Every structure is written in C-alpha cells, then in structure tokens.
Amino acid sequence: MPTLGPVDAAQVPRFAGPATFARLPRLDEVTAADVAIVGVPFDTGVSYRPGARFGPAHVRASSKLLRPYNPALDVLPFDRLQVADAGDIACNPFSIDEAVAAIERGADALTGSGSRLLTIGGDHTIALPLLRSVARRHGPVAVVHFDAHLDTWDTYFGTPTTHGTPFRLASQEGLIDREASMHVGIRGPLYSDKDLTDDRALGFSAVTSPEIEIDGVAAAIERMKARIGDRPVYVSVDIDVLDPAHAPGTGTPEAGGLTSRELLRMLRAFSDFNVVGADIVEVAPAYDHAELTGIAAAHVGYELLSAMAAAQRP
Ligand code: MN
Ligand code: MN
C-alpha cells in the first residue's frame, strides 16, 4: 500500500500547512505507522538552563523545509516507511517520577502495534522510560549515545532520576547491552577521573570529541560498527553533542563539539544497523538563534528516518 507522505509543497507553501514534523500526516490520519514521531515536552530533570519542554514544538517548526528525497543515502524515506506524527505525550511537570511513568506508558501504547519511535524531547531524563519500553520489546539494546556529557552520573541534590543520570539507571536496570553501548562526542570538564571509570564499569565505551578531531569521522564510524555489530540499537542524540556554534539552544552547552556536518554523516552510517528506536533531546528554544538548533535537530531526525528507510532497502 502506498504511504501517505508530507503535504505537497507545490500545493501548500512550506510556511503554511500542518505543524507536524516535516509536514507529515498525523498518526490518526494513517492506518498504521512504521515509525511514529512523538514529542515529550518535559524538562523537570534539567540541572542548568531550563526550557527543553518547548523543544518538540520548536523542532517541528524548524522541520518545514525537509524535502522528500535524501541524495546522501539515495532514499525517499517517507515512501519506504509510513512515518506519522503522534503528537505529544502529556506528562506531569511537577513530578519526575509521575512523568517518567507516563512516558513509559505512552511509548508502550505507541509501539504496541509495531511502530518504532523517534522521540523529540524534552530533556535527557526521558531516555530512561523510553529505554524501559524498548528493552521490554527487544531485550537489552546497544545504545549509541551522542552527547557532550556521559549522563551516567549519580544522584544530583539527592535525586536519582535527572537528565544527567539516565544511562546509569538504564545500565543498572539491565536495559542496555553492556558489551555494545557507547558514547560519541564526549568532551569538557568532569567532576573527577572517577566519572570515567564509573562509566566504563556501567558498560560504555567512548569516542570523544577530541578523538573525532584527530582520527576523523570515518574512524568513529568504524568504531561504532565494531562495537554494535548486528545487535538492535537505540540512538540517543543530545543536541549538545554539537558545538554551541551549531546548536546554541540547549541547556548545558560545552565548547569544542562536533559540527552538524560531522554528526549527520555519522547518523547516515545507521543505514547499516538495526535501529529499533531513537530520540533527539535537550533542544531549548529560548537560547536558540535563527533556528540554528531547531534546524540541526530537524535534520538529525530526517537522517535517522532516512537511515531506517535505507536499512529496509529491498
Ligand atoms: Mn549533554
Ligand atoms: Mn544528555
């Protein structure tokens, strides 16, 4: 059956039309979705600048220029996959625990009919309930985590569940494959070198931002392939993996990051992997300028969808 794609820009100008991601149909306009895009407007887990609760609407607004054909992967992602926008998961802004439970329920409901999820946050706390939902379906998954930060820290102000801790908790709960998970783009000051030894014990390897500068993007892709193999993989993209020059609109910026060109090239490599879910988090539009961060995040979503579509090449 042919898919229902984005609204035709020859009929409705790009600055008009629906407010869905890439002007795609809503989930209730299609019979079933191969990939559902869902927003999670939650930022109660942030430690510094708040505002990622406005991320889903901003990334959708910044996605209006995305076009149907991706020449870099030679794929029409919305032809090969039925992609639809599922709206937002409503969650409690005053209770992290209640919000986390609601996100997990929302993800379970959306994936119950076999859809994969591309989630737009929201702060990085949301990766924990999303991984709980993914692991229930697929078992422990390889996580490829693009971020300036490890996000395997311990409690903050006595609170275990924050945007700095989702991958510690996911590892402790057995949601991730400890032989196959990794960070990409790590950089910046830490509390101590113990952060790194704790992180390795939790099952992560790392390709740091300085290593990408020295060895190049191709070498980083080879390390991802060696680490992941053919395992089911979950991709989590904290937009602060990009340099603040490329993504100023985020909560905990760190200098010395990736360019959007480097990140998009690495994401195309996921056409060789079995991606079972993905998220894009930490877009905080109040600190954005000229939609730089929103556009970067929209293209991250487009390349992830394209990679999933290219992986299904007949
Ligand atoms: Mn980060
Ligand atoms: Mn993060």
Image (cartoon, rainbow, N blue to C red):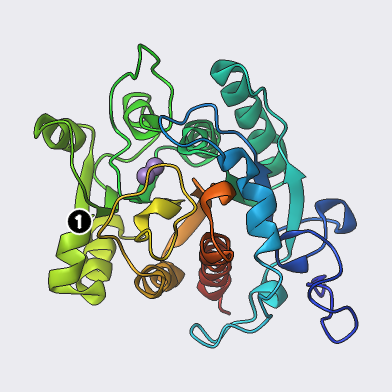
According to the picture, the residue beneath numbered tag 1 turns out to be 208
Residue 94 visible in the current orientation:
yes
Element assignment for label 1: strand
Q: Is residue 44 left or right of residue 157?
A: right
Q: Is residue 112 left or right of residue 246?
A: right
The spot of residue 15 in percent (x, y) is 80, 72
> What is the residue that sits farthest to the left in this orientation?
193
**For the N terminus, which image quadrant?**
bottom right
Number of numbered discs visible in the structure rendering: 1
The reply, left or right, for residue 225 in relation to residue 75 is left
Coordinates of residue 153 in the picture (x, y in percent) = 28, 28
Kindly tell me whether residue 231 is visible in this rendering.
Answer: no
Q: Which quadrant of the structure image shows residue 201?
A: top left
- Residue shown at the point (14%, 37%) measured from the top left: 196
Q: Is residue 285 above or below residue 34?
A: above
Residue 43 drawn above or below residue 86: above
Residue sitting at 70 percent across and 61 percent down? 61
Name the foreground residue: 305 vs 15.
15
Q: Determine whether, in the image, residue 169 is placed left or right of residue 62.
A: left
Q: 261 above or below 243? A: below
Percent x, y of residue 235: 44, 53
The quadrant of the image that shows the C terminus is bottom right
Q: Amino acid at mark 1?
A: Thr
Q: Which residue lies most toward the top here?
A: 158
Instruction: Tell me where residue 16 appears, x and y as whole percent.
Output: 85, 70
Determine the quadrant in which ligand 1 lies: top left
Is 282 drawn above or below residue 18 in the view shown?
above
Q: Residue at x 51, y 60 (%)?
A: 293
Q: Residues within 10 Å of mark 1 (few under 14, many from 20)?
A: some
